[in-house]
Image (cartoon, rainbow, N blue to C red):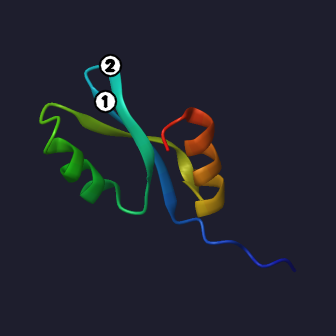
């Protein structure tokens, strides 16, 4: 049986209204949202998809141009 990779990384977009102002990856959505609210107090975090591996999340981040 193949070993499962850790799926502990979230992909997210931080939005103010419907406008995406930042996107990226994190292991803790609540902490990351608090950090972004320092700059954009009216914003909110939107999880994109399911938890995934760090490698897959980094590939998504690069593809989207967030890194």
Q: Residue at x 58, y 52 (%)?
A: 57
Residue 40 found in image quarter = top left
In depth, the one of 28 and 1 nearer the eye is 28
Query: What secondary structure is found at the residue carrying circle 2?
Result: loop
Q: CA distance from mark 1 to mark 2?
A: 6 Å
Position of residue 35 measured from the top left corner of the image (x, y, whole percent) = 21, 52
- The number of callouts visible is 2
Dividing the image into 4 quarters, which one contains the N terminus? bottom right
**Contact (Cβ within 8 Å) of mark 1 with mark 2:** yes
Q: Residue at x 63, y 37 (%)?
A: 63
In depth, the one of 67 and 37 nearer the eye is 67
In depth, the one of 66 and 4 nearer the eye is 66
Position of residue 64 measured from the top left corner of the image (x, y, whole percent) = 57, 34
Note whether 8 is above or below 15 in the view shown. Answer: below
Is residue 65 visible from the viewing direction of this image?
yes
Note whether 66 is above or below 30 in the view shown. Answer: above
Q: Residues within 10 Å of mark 1 (few under 14, many from 20)?
A: some
Residue annotated with mark 2: 18
Position of residue 23 measured from the top left corner of the image (x, y, whole percent) = 42, 39
Residue 22 found in image quarter = top left
Residue furthest right as drawn:
1
Q: Residues within 10 Å of mark 2 (few under 14, many from 20)?
A: few
Is residue 53 visible from the viewing direction of this image?
no
Specify whether 52 is left or right of 41: right
Residue annotated with mark 1: 15
Position of residue 67 measured from the top left corner of the image (x, y, whole percent) = 50, 44
Note whether 50 is above or below 46 in the view shown. Answer: below
Query: What secondary structure is found at the residue carrying circle 1?
Result: strand
Q: Residue at x 59, y 42 (%)?
A: 62
């Amino acid at each position: 049986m193949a070993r499962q990779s850790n799926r502990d990384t979230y992909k997210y977009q931080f939005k103010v209204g419907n406008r995406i102002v930042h996107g990226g990856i994190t292991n803790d959505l609540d902490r990351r949202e608090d950090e972004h609210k320092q700059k954009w107090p009216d914003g909110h975090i939107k999880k994109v998809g399911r938890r995934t591996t760090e490698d897959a999340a980094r590939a998504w981040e690069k593809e989207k141009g967030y890194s």
